[in-house]
Image: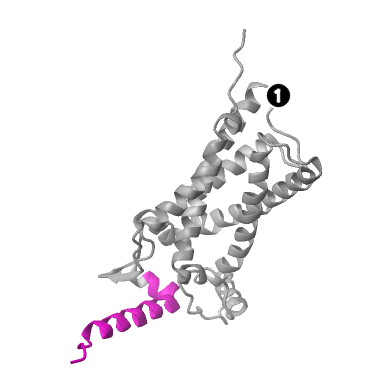
Amino acid sequence: MHMQRELLFDSLAWLVWLVPFVGVLAAAFTARKDPVVEGDRVLRHDKAAILEHWAHGIGTAVLLVSGIALGVWFLPALVGSGEPVWTMMNVHFWAVVLFLFGTFYYGANTLLAMKRFREHLPTKDAIDYTKRHYGLLLGFKKFTMPPERKYFESEKMAYILALASTIVIIVTGFFKVAAHSLDIPSSLMAFMTPAHDIATVAMLAFFVAHVFFAAVLPMSWPVLRSMFTGYVDLEYAKHEHAGWMAEIGDSEKDSAGAESEEPAA
């Protein structure tokens, strides 16, 4: 006699609703550290940034694998019925929990310091810098290295796709979780399910490109290391992110000037 497997989306659904608040609360008690030059290296990511990146990233990776295995709107499932489906659904559940913590921790950290959100957004230089950057990668000598900021302009444009996909996945995902305990109209779920799947495919496209350009290409390895150590080499930063280094220099000058001012008598 086989015991019925426990579906965590039924028994622990409350955790899906709780973990976003945990992420926001954790951000409220997190002391962030801005980028700064320390000797021959530059602090690029503080510990909070590393935590939110890997929580969101690992959660996303497992969600994509388990979600595709369970089947999306226009592709058949890779797992059959019964035990494999229950197992994959529970894997998907824990990935949801990790993904939501990382995403809401990041979101709250970003909203508490809007400059962290703005640094991800494309600027008026997006098209020109992207053309020059990839022109250099392709060997066109007529291009010069643009003074990129902390994130490449090409990354910032891809960020818009990731942000939109994440929002759709979260909103539609909440409806799918709620459907395990509430009577959601079938007409509404008929919209939510394909929207969730389409956003998943968009996220998959972003994720594959992100892994390739951020981890596979050797030129990106210094930045990849910074997602573990927090630091990049100073000379690398000066060459690849001259605009960012100028911003850090201006910030340090402002801080030094403020500290040197004498209080009024």
Towards the viewer: 94 or 224: 94
**Other-residue count near label 1 (Cα within 10 Å), few / some / many at <14 / 14–19 / ≥20:** few
Left or right relative to 265: residue 120: right
**Which stretch did the figure color magenta?**
236-265
**Label 1: which residue?**
81
Image location (x, y in percent) of residue 192: 73, 47
Image location (x, y in percent) of residue 107: 50, 59
Q: Residue at x 44, y 61 (%)?
A: 109
Q: Does the magenta stretch include residue 248?
A: yes
Left or right relative to 11: residue 231: left
Tell me which colouring the rendered structure shows: one colour
Q: Can residue 225 be seen in this view?
A: no
Image location (x, y in percent) of residue 171: 65, 51
Towards the viewer: 152 or 191: 191
Query: Identity of the amino acid at label 1?
Result: Ser
Say above or below: 30 vs 239: above
Q: Which residue is drawn at 49% across and 75% down?
A: 148
Q: Which residue is drawn at 54% across and 59% down?
A: 213
Towards the viewer: 146 or 31: 31
Image location (x, y in percent) of residue 75: 76, 40
Question: Looking at the rendering, which quadrant does residue 42 occupy?
Answer: bottom left
Q: Is residue 151 visible?
A: yes
Question: Image quadrant for the N terminus?
Answer: top right
